[in-house]
Amino acid sequence: MGIKLAIDDFGTGYSSLAYLRRFSVDRLKIDRSFVADVESDADAASLVASIVLLGSTLGLELVAEGVENAAQAEFLRDRKCQRAQGFHFSRPVSADAVVALSDNFRRASLLG
């Protein structure tokens, strides 16, 4: 059917590790609260790196939420996080403006 399942805000709230076994998950979205602090907090950086490694090992697509600057994007790229979303790539725009931003969306694929 083409339906894929993502766990949003992974690492917070109700996003349990048990869900990775219970459901046929395709994608993990790393919560922005971890991404925001990767430059200044060694624990946050370790957690994000661990989530990326865990997801990669399980064959899941990874999306980092809340990427707001080039340093955060580089940190994620260096750890092989495939995708990112956030103000670093674009502020929210109308549907009509999406076509004009196609280069930014391509850049959101951190691995090329």
Image (cartoon, rainbow, N blue to C red):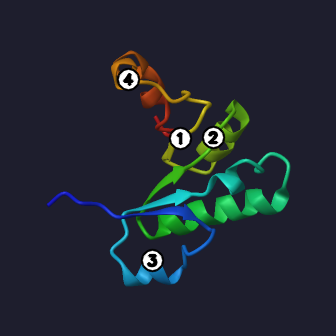
Q: Which residue shows up at 44% across the image and 70% down it?
A: 58
Residue underneath mark 3: 20
Q: Nearer the viewer, mark 4 or mark 2?
A: 4
Residue underneath mark 2: 67
- Circle nearer the N terminus (1, 3): 3
Residue 68 - label? none
Q: Residues within 10 Å of mark 2 (few under 14, many from 20)?
A: many
Is 58 on the left or on the right of 30, as rendered? left
Q: Nearer the viewer, mark 4 or mark 3?
A: 4
Q: Are marks 4 and 2 in contact (CB under 8 Å)?
A: no
Q: Position of residue 82 (x, y in %)?
A: 48, 47
In front here: 24 or 77?
A: 24
Q: Which residue shows up at 52% across the image and 39% down it?
A: 110
Three-letter amino acid code at the position of disc 1: Gln
Q: Are marks 1 and 2 in contact (CB under 8 Å)?
A: yes
Three-letter amino acid code at the position of disc 3: Leu
Q: Are marks 3 and 2 in contact (CB under 8 Å)?
A: no
